[in-house]
Image (tube, rainbow, N blue to C red):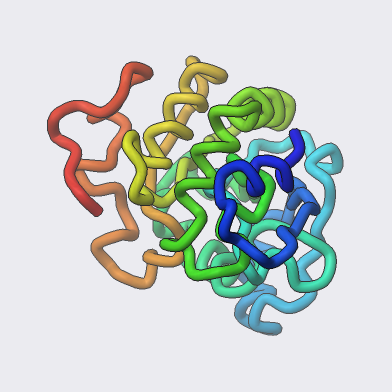
Amino acid sequence: MNFVDIVSRTRKSHIRQPEDRACPDQYLGSLSTLEELLRVQNWEGVTREPVSQRPSSPAFIVVLESPHKDEYEGTPGPAKGATGRAIARWLRDVVGAIDGNADYSVIVVNAVQYQCSLGCITSKHRDTLFKAVWESSGEADFRKRLAGVHREGDIVICCCTKGRTNPPLREMVFKAIKATLPEARVLTRYHPASWWRNRNLRAPVDWHLSAWNVNGPSNQTQSS
């Protein structure tokens, strides 16, 4: 995939040189470790490792849409800044009671590893570029990466934003997850940036697995 070429074809008026580094999928540590780092160091000192370094224990695989500004501060990495702090602060509440007190690892995966926002406000470029990448080789790339990351016992949490595309970004990503891992346990949640709202800590009826299938959403889905 040549992201710069896709940007040139899709956003001809964009002047700034696009960020051409892929933001890698990463293992961030156990959820309890991230919670403690947030409490003691405000999320500083997170040890980021390639997903190949994950332990054999089950993991939460948090799927986001594409990296934005914070993810390119220093070495690229997913869920930096406020998004990472939200995952550490609220992921346990978002997921709910699962498997007693099991301490899951946390892995963060971007459906598209390139900065579709081009560092601008997300409404300007992100959705158009995400769809262009997805329809090029982005979906195939995501499915290959996801299949390589997932292990039996993992729980995939689709937290992609809706966006302004038709179909919505999260529908495209959710369908790819289900097509790749039809037997996996998949939860659907709002993007971590919105978890500070109590109503978004658990999946609402219109954004829940029971309202979706690999053919798309049911008629219950609404704006969010």
Query: Residue 146: x and y, percent?
Result: 65, 30
For the C terminus, the quadrant is: bottom left
Q: Kindly indicate the quadrant of the structure image that contains residue 111.
A: top right
Q: Does 48 appear above or below 4?
A: below
Q: Residue at x 73, y 66 (%)?
A: 72
The answer to whether residue 60 shows anywhere in this view is no
Residue 20 vs residue 145, the one in the foreground? 20
- Which residue appears at 23% of the width and 30% of the height? 211
The residue under the point 23% across, 48% down is 204
Query: Residue 134 at x, y = what percent?
Result: 56, 33
Q: Position of residue 86 (x, y in %)?
A: 51, 68
Q: Quadrant of the N terminus?
A: top right
Residue at 69% x, 54% y is 30
Of residues 56 and 198, the one nearer the viewer is 198
Task: Please tell me whether residue 106 is drawn above or below residue 158 in the rendered image.
Answer: below
Q: Residue furthest left?
A: 219
- Residue 13 can be seen, yes or no: yes
The spot of residue 129 in percent (x, y) is: 54, 46
Left or right: 163 in relation to 16: left
Please state which of residues 31 and 75 is positioned toward the viewer in this rendering: 75
Q: How many marks?
A: 0
Residue 193 quadrant: bottom left
Would you identify the image quadrant in which residue 218 lies? top left
Q: Is residue 70 above or below residue 174?
A: below
